[in-house]
Image (cartoon, rainbow, N blue to C red):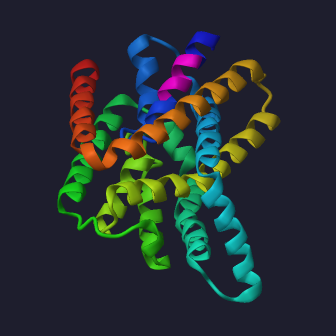
């Protein structure tokens, strides 16, 4: 992979990870449309690590408070709002960890194709719009309980299917549980931290043990570019999501799905 391809894919990842349009789907589609060889799951995870840097940097203050309160709850057996949020993130991560561990090989071998992406873009895009229209939107993320966090976590596990959108499906679940748009987005971003960290660590170990050489310069370039664009995207989305809603993203997903079908069917 040349540096230009890495930069383009990293920008795509940085913009699409936190918008509800499926970063994994776009990372599959861009090489198909541009005639590039598929970059493989390892590079996809590398640029996901870049967006992990973005979300940890952006939410560093609440993450620090959650970490301190979560660890403190183990000692004092008492939960404040930050401690409860920390445990919600931990419990919400369990489903994607289990499904990712058991099904990553199947996903990489059979689901990384454009027509499958078109289907998941459409179905989950419509579900997102329905949740946006019908959700009460009366709660913030600190009102979530452990059971509700687990429900959102199970939704996040569905995002292992390319085209689903991790942020899209978790925002959808949050809206269905009565969160406001911005609260659902913030919890989605916080929930992404351990999941992306686990996936990045797993792929790093695979790369270290693989016989094939790893182009660390290109990989590092991808991480850096996706981190910068991801940070900008988080800031922009949280500024505008309450005003614009999720309908524009649903329309985009349906149009993109139609283009995929016309091109590849």
Q: Position of residue 30 (x, y in %)?
A: 43, 21
State the extent of the magenta-drawn residues as a range.
7-12
Q: Position of residue 121 (x, y in %)?
A: 30, 40
Question: Residue at horizontal 43%, vertical 64%?
Answer: 152
Question: Residue at horizontal 68%, vertical 22%?
Answer: 221
Q: Would you say the magenta stretch is mainly helix, strand or loop?
A: helix
Q: Residue furthest bottom?
A: 77
Q: Is residue 110 visible?
A: no
Left or right of 46: which side holds 128? left
Q: Is residue 154 above or below residue 17?
A: below
Left or right of 66: which side holds 253? left
Question: Residue at horizontal 46%, vertical 55%?
Answer: 186
Left or right of 224: which side holds 32? left
Q: Is residue 177 above or below residue 130?
A: below
Q: Position of residue 116 (x, y in %)?
A: 34, 37
Question: Residue at horizontal 66%, vertical 30%?
Answer: 223
Left or right of 72: which side holds 248? left
Of 240 and 165, the residue lying toward us: 240
Of 107 and 226, the residue lying toward us: 226
Residue 254, quarter of the rendered image: top left
Residue 46, quarter of the rendered image: top right
Task: For the C terminus, give its image quadrant.
Answer: top left
Q: Is residue 102 above or below residue 55?
A: below
Q: Is residue 100 magenta?
A: no
Q: Is residue 29 visible?
A: yes
Task: For the N terminus, give its image quadrant.
Answer: top right
Q: Position of residue 191 (x, y in %)?
A: 53, 58
Q: Is residue 8 magenta?
A: yes
Residue 148, quarter of the rendered image: bottom left
């Amino acid at each position: 992979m040349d540096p230009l391809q890495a930069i383009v894919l990293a920008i795509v990842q940085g913009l699409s990870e936190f918008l509800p349009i499926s970063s994994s789907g776009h990372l599959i589609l861009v090489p198909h449309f541009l005639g590039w060889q598929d970059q493989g799951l390892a590079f996809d995870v590398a640029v996901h690590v870049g967006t992990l840097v973005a979300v940890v940097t952006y939410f560093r203050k609440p993450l620090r408070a959650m970490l301190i309160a979560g660890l403190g709850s183990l000692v004092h057996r008492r939960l404040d709002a930050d401690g409860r949020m920390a445990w919600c993130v931990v419990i919400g991560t369990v489903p994607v960890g289990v499904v990712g561990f058991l099904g990553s090989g199947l996903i990489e071998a059979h689901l990384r194709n454009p027509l499958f992406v078109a289907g998941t873009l459409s179905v989950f895009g419509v579900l997102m719009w329905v949740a946006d229209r019908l959700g009460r939107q009366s709660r913030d993320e600190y009102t979530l309980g452990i059971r509700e966090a687990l429900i959102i976590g199970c939704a996040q596990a569905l995002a292992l299917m390319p085209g689903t959108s991790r942020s899209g499906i978790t925002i959808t679940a949050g809206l269905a549980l009565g969160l406001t748009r911005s609260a659902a987005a913030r919890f989605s971003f916080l929930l992404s931290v351990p999941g992306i960290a686990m996936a990045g660590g797993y792929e790093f170990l695979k790369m270290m043990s693989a016989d094939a050489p790893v182009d660390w310069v290109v990989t590092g370039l991808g991480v850096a570019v996706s981190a910068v664009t991801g940070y900008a995207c988080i800031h922009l989305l949280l500024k505008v999501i309450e005003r614009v809603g999720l309908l524009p993203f649903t329309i985009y997903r349906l149009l993109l799905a139609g283009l995929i079908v016309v091109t590849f069917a």
